[in-house]
Every structure is written in structure tokens, then in C-alpha cells.
Image (tube, grey):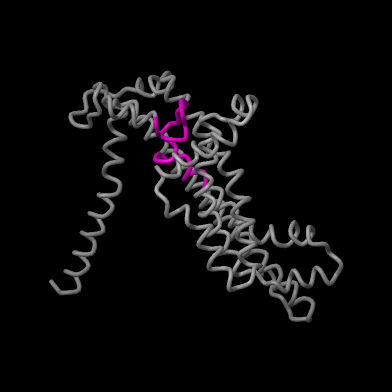
Amino acid sequence: MTSKLVMKSMIGFYIFLFFLYLFGPLLVMSVTAFNTPSYPQAVPFEAFTLDWFGKLYNHKAMMEGLRNSFIIGFGVVALSVPVGLAASIIMNQIYHRARSTFYLVTVSPVLTPGVIIGISTVIFWKDVLGATDFTKEYFYKGIILSIFGQSSFVAAYCLLIIMARLQRFDRAQEEAALDLGASYPQVFWHILLPFLKPALISAAVVAFLSSFENYNTTTFAILADKTLVTVLAGEVRQGTTPALSALAVIIIGISLAGAIAYELMKRREEAQAERAKERAKIAERADVGVPVAVGA
């Protein structure tokens, strides 16, 4: 046995422990979702059942919380991504000496505890939305306040993601378009936004996931309403059931399906781009009169 073999064995062992630490609890929880005991139990496995998925579907509080979580998540995306986009453009345009101050102001909500943001959101918007009976009745609600509270710091995440992409943007494209007669809105819609499309999609995904799993801010801003996270917290305090494991299995399945679909789409796009490059090379050779082998 050589030292190199020992080193590879030790590295493999630690990698195995690392992935076991990451995915072991998920595997155990997945098994409990299909076991019959009323308390989450993986061993001994008594009998296979799908009843816990049916009980999860019939859990009114959890289904209501899930619906509210989706509403709040999409609302946070609709508010945070445009705010983050606007802030990143301002960051890229303002005088460089003012950027550090502007950056500090926009990113500071990320450093603020979620409890403080949740309480501040309720207090501030109570005076703003409670000014009239109409706004108090239709807007001073837990879902609206949660969207406002979460967006105050989720927009900072969107800012950082979009800024990372925007720093690679070639301003010469804007100048060329303006010189050719394009207006500023046309430059924004036809040049800047297509370039920022990957960052905008990434920011939207991060914003939705950050909103969906948020607890500290939501538990204060949600008022009398509930989200999936707040319902789960209450259920765990009272004693967990395999129905929660069934929910975890569904979330894991959706995540895996999304990751696989994204990877397949990415590989297909890369293959299409590679084929386009090959066709461009063949066309270039044909234009300059270079013989092209049959089947190339």
C-alpha cells in the first residue's frame, strides 16, 4: 500500500462523510413519509403507505399557508427585481465617490435582523396604510406587509446579482446605439435588458426562494395571516407528523426536477451554440474559397 493510495482513500472517506451529512437527514425524512407509524419513523419500516400525502393535502392550514407563500413570493419578485435593477443602474451611473455611500444604504437591510425589519414594517405601514379606511381595509394586511418587509432586504440580493452582470457590460454598445439614433428607452429595452436577462432570472429565483423560506421577518409582518413556514413552525411545536415528511419529499422532488430540467436545457443550448459555431466556420470557409470536406 502506497502513500498515494492512502491519501485517496482518506479523501474518498471524508467526501463520503460530507455527502452523508448533507443528504442523510433528507433520505431518512423521505423514508418516514412512506411509513405507516403516526410519528416520523424510518426504522423499523412497518408498511408502505401514501396516506400521509393525502393528509397533507387535506391539511387546511398548511394549504392556506402554501398559497400565501406563493402569493408573497411572486409579489416579492415583482417588487424586488425592478428595485434591484434600478439600484444597480444608478450604482453604475452615479459619481464614483458617492457609490460607497449609496452601496451602504442599499445593502444595509441585509445586515439588519429580520425581527427588526418585521416590526418596523408593521409600525411604519400602519401609519401610511392606516391613514384612510380604504387603505386600511384593502392594503393593511399580512400578505401586503410581508411583501413590503421582505422586499426591503431581498432587493439588496437582487442588486448584488445584477451588479455582478452589469459590470461586464460594454458601454460602447449603448453609445453606438445612441449615435445611430436610438432613444434611451430603446437602448434599455433592446440592448441592456437582453444582456441582463440571465442575471434578472437568477435574481428572480433567489428572491422567490428567499421569500418562500423566510421566517423572522414574516412572523411579525404577516399579522393574522399565515405562510407555510409559520404553519410548519407551529406544527413542529405541537409535535411533528409524517405529513411534514411528505411535504419535504414533494419539495425535494420539485427541486430535483427543476435542477435536472435546467441542466438539460443548458446542455441543449450549449449544443445548439456549438453547432451554430460550426456552421459559421463552414460558411466562412466557403466565402473565402477554402475547400470543405464532405460531411464536415
User: Is 17 or 129 nearer to us in this picture?
Assistant: 129
Q: Image height check: is 112 above or below 141?
A: below
Q: Residue at the spot x=44%, y=39% of the render?
A: 119
Quadrant assignment, res 11: bottom left
Q: Residue 135, how many percent across, how many down? A: 63, 29
Residue 15 appears in the figure: yes
Q: Is residue 93 left or right of residue 239?
A: right
| Quadrant (top left/top right/bottom left/bottom right) for the N terminus | bottom left
| Quadrant (top left/top right/bottom left/bottom right) for the C terminus | bottom right
Q: Residue 265, how many percent across, how many down? A: 57, 51
Residue 71 appears in the figure: no
- Magenta: main secondary structure equals helix
- Number of dots carrying numbers: 0
Q: Residue 196, how many percent across, how many down? A: 64, 59
Q: Residue furthest left?
A: 1
Q: Is residue 62 left or right of residue 186?
A: left
Q: Is residue 238 left or right of residue 10?
A: right
Q: Residue at the spot x=47%, y=56% of the render?
A: 108
In the image, is residue 66 part of the stretch drawn in magenta?
no
User: Is 3 or 171 nearer to us in this picture?
Assistant: 171
Magenta range: 207-230
Q: Image height check: is 61 above or below 294?
A: above
Q: Image height check: is 77 above or below 104?
A: above
Quadrant assignment, res 89: bottom right
In the image, is residue 218 part of the stretch drawn in magenta?
yes
User: Is 153 or 12 nearer to us in this picture?
Assistant: 153
Q: Image height check: is 253 above or below 291?
A: above
Q: Residue at the spot x=26%, y=55% of the render?
A: 18
Q: Residue 254, how many percent across, how many down? A: 46, 39
